Amino acid sequence: MKIFKDKHTLQKEILKTKGISFVPTMGGLHEGHISLIKQSKKTKLKTLVSIFVNPKQFNKKSDFKSYPRNTKKDIKQLKKLKINYLYIPTFKDIYGFKPKKKVFLDKFSKKLCGKFRKGHFEGVLNVVNRFIEIIKPRYIFLGKKDYQQLYLIKKHIEKRKIKSKIVECKTIRENNGIACSSRNSNLNKNQIKIASNIFYYLRNLKKKIKKNNNLFKVNKIKEDLRNLGATKIDYLENYNTKSFKKIKKLNKKFNLFFAYYIKNTRLIDNI
Ligand code: AMP
């Protein structure tokens, strides 16, 4: 595994390859990241993983500061996985140039997380646009856990006629149902139990809603979530995952999208 901290040396190396399968991450690696990497390795192209905690996508400084980082452990894990390249850029390496393409921000960026984390998706698209320009990956592996992010990156790629292909990867969960997330390491045992109870409650609720449309009473559900231990709920909404339209007839295909806090930790998921 070769490690790069500078885009010019990385680009020189990439030129020698037949193409790159790219897995962007913010580190704090877990089984979700690992499943993306394993899928990337199946392409037979060289796999490049990046670790960059992008300050521009955090709307609160305190959240950026407390975001879990463990680069030493990440490097060990990535070596074991036998990836080809690891890119750990500095802020200047990413933001010290003007990208050729402008970011395209679909209107869906104003919903869900976009409503509660001002500037978040602008920051995500900004960094992804730059990574694409530096790496020009053939494939980019993204998780459905961050479905809104995945959708917006796809829209940007379509609109800007970028040649990279997005590979959508399923959400990996812990045995207790919670979606693997770097932020889980900020939860204590009791808080993990709360997150697990909330997952099962919402999963059962979705099943019931499919049978009986009348059950989607958001305020009542939010109250139940608070009783289960959620400190604050940002949103709980249903959307069709292809069109991102709200579904009126809930016997049709939809996902429940939710974001909530347990104390200071914000968790998002969709089921
Ligand atoms: P992050 O490091 O949180 O920015 O995530 C990097 C990539 O891993 C993104 O494409 C995420 O959607 C994906 N990812 C994060 N958690 C999971 C998970 N539990 N299952 C699958 N993919 C995930």
Image (cartoon, rainbow, N blue to C red):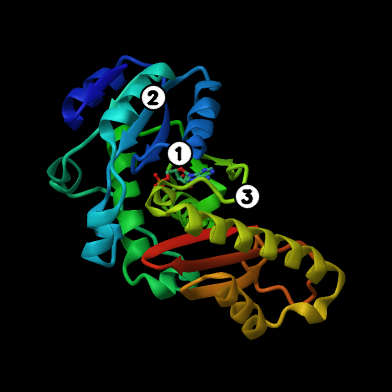
Above or below, 206 relative to 173: below
- Percent from the top left, x then y, of residue 29? 40, 37
Image quarter of residue 130: top left
On the rendered image, what quadrant is the N terminus found in?
A: top left
- Percent from the top left, x then y, of residue 155? 49, 56
Image quarter of residue 120: bottom left
Tag 2: amino acid:
Gln
Look at mark 2 in the image and give the residue it sits on.
77
Q: Residue furthest right?
A: 211
Helix, strand or loop at mark 1? loop
Asked whether 2 or 76 is in front, the reply is 76
Look at mark 3 in the image and give the residue it sits on.
177
Q: Is residue 122 left or right of 154 when viewed as pictured? A: left
Helix, strand or loop at mark 3? loop
Query: Which residue is at a point 35% across and 55% down the rendered structure image?
Result: 124
Tag 3: amino acid:
Gly
Q: CA distance from mark 1 to mark 2?
A: 30 Å
First-in-chain label (3 vs 1): 1
Q: CA distance from mark 3 to mark 2?
A: 23 Å
Above or below, 270 relative to 171: below
Above or below, 128 relative to 164: below
Q: Of circles 3 and 1, which is in front?
A: 3
Q: Which mark is residue 163?
A: 1
